[in-house]
Image (cartoon, grey):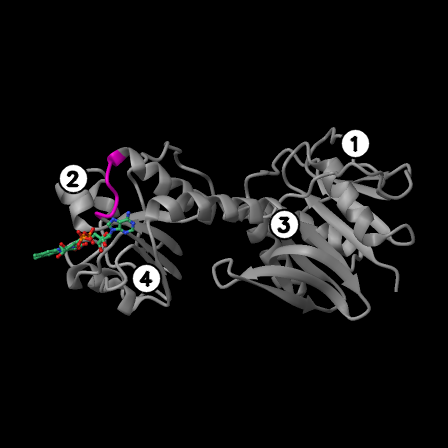
Amino acid sequence: MTPRVLCVCVRAGLEAAYGAQARRLAGDAGQAAILSAETEPSDPGPVDRVYQVMDPSFDRGRGDHWAAAISAATRSFDPSLVLTGPTKVEVEALARAASTLGAPVVTRGRAVRITESGVQAERDLLSGNAVGTESASGPVVFLALAEEPSVGTEAVGSQTAAERISLPVELPAYAYRRVSLRPKPPQELDLEGAERIVSVGRGLQRKEDLALVEQLATVLGAAVGCTRPIAAESGWLSDEHWVGLTGHRVRPFLYLAVGISGAAQHLVGMRDSKLVVAINKDPNAPIFQQADFQVVGDLYAILPELTRQLAAARASR
Ligand SMILES: Cc1cc2nc3c(=O)[nH]c(=O)nc-3n(C[C@H](O)[C@H](O)[C@H](O)COP(=O)(O)OP(=O)(O)OC[C@H]3O[C@@H](n4cnc5c(N)ncnc54)[C@H](O)[C@@H]3O)c2cc1C
């Protein structure tokens, strides 16, 4: 069966990238389309169809509106794969549409392929420590990418004059609106809900060295935690970062303890972490008894190198 790929372009200006993606997956023999809510979408590249939502009531920031558009475009185009990006709106839209149409959903997919048996994609698992390949099949598969696609340098497929179709969309009748929008103060941190935490203790010598911890946390997509002395005594971080008996009880997937001895009062706050990695220069530090991975060494040597290697690994994906 020749593939039919519909790419949903929620963010304006990415039409060419999604068009190229749709063509790449559909191949020259297949059919490629994009769905856009732009009245004048930028050049979508070598696709066969461009579905456009022209309804002035359509709200591009709403997942339920996009879900209605995706459902309508899916019914019209009959794709074997519907693909979109990684944002919350895109994932919500995809999940809603897939539920309406009884189709499987794959999120955070990379290296997407259409095979004889369905759609295959790789996904980061175990807090980014493993990569799984997953396969979904059905008349149509819905897939949200881990990252927005890029156009790439090489030409993709042959250029066709895309047919433009104004898509009628049945928008939900209920009322839903954003009441207000305020910038989030930087100290508002959801440590207890964090999936990954890089936590620092008195092994750190100067406040300025927090940059090492923050850089690692950024690369890992982690929140920054700390022991009581770092918050209560040094005041280098606010109380919101403090983990322990008298601080926050956290339960992330990954807890990376840096220069933390592992006092009982600290352990109480992080013992529900799934995977604990500890970096400490003292091989007898009590934290190692709680750690799944023990790294004995100087945090000042390890952190920059770890950050560099993780950033390089991420960039090469
Ligand atoms: C009533 C009470 C409540 C408390 N509540 C809490 C709480 O909620 N949370 C909390 O965290 N603490 C709490 N404490 C404090 C707790 O007992 C410990 O004092 C504290 O957790 C120790 O913090 P730390 O691990 O950062 O420092 P330290 O115990 O001083 O440990 C620093 C560690 O860094 C290592 N290190 C030093 N230099 C380096 C380097 N260059 N590279 C790698 N490793 C290095 C050292 O080997 C050491 O293991 C409480 C105490 C009391 C009495």
* Element assignment for label 4: loop
Residue 167 appears in view: no
Horizontal and vertical percent position of residue 163: 87, 39
* Element assignment for label 2: loop
Residue with the mark numbered 2: 234
Assess disc 1: are there few (<14), some (14-19) or many (≥20) residues with their C-alpha within 10 Å of its C-alpha: some
* Element assignment for label 1: loop
- Nearer-the-camera pick, 228 or 287: 287
166 drawn magenta = no
Question: Which residue occupies 24% across, 45% down?
Answer: 240
Horizontal and vertical percent position of residue 183: 37, 32
Q: Amino acid at mark 3?
A: Arg
Q: Amino acid at mark 2?
A: Ser
Highlighted range, magenta: 202-207
Which labelled disc corresponds to residue 251? 4
- Could you tell whether 276 is left or right of 51 in the image? left
Which callout, 2 or 3, points at the residue further toward the start of the chain? 2
* Element assignment for label 3: loop
205 drawn magenta = yes
Residue with the mark numbered 3: 317
Which callout, 1 or 4, points at the residue further toward the start of the chain? 1
Tell me how far mark 1 sits from mark 3, CA to CA.
Answer: 27 Å
Horizontal and vertical percent position of residue 4: 82, 55
Tell me how far mark 1 sits from mark 2, CA to CA.
Answer: 55 Å
Q: Amino acid at mark 1?
A: Asp
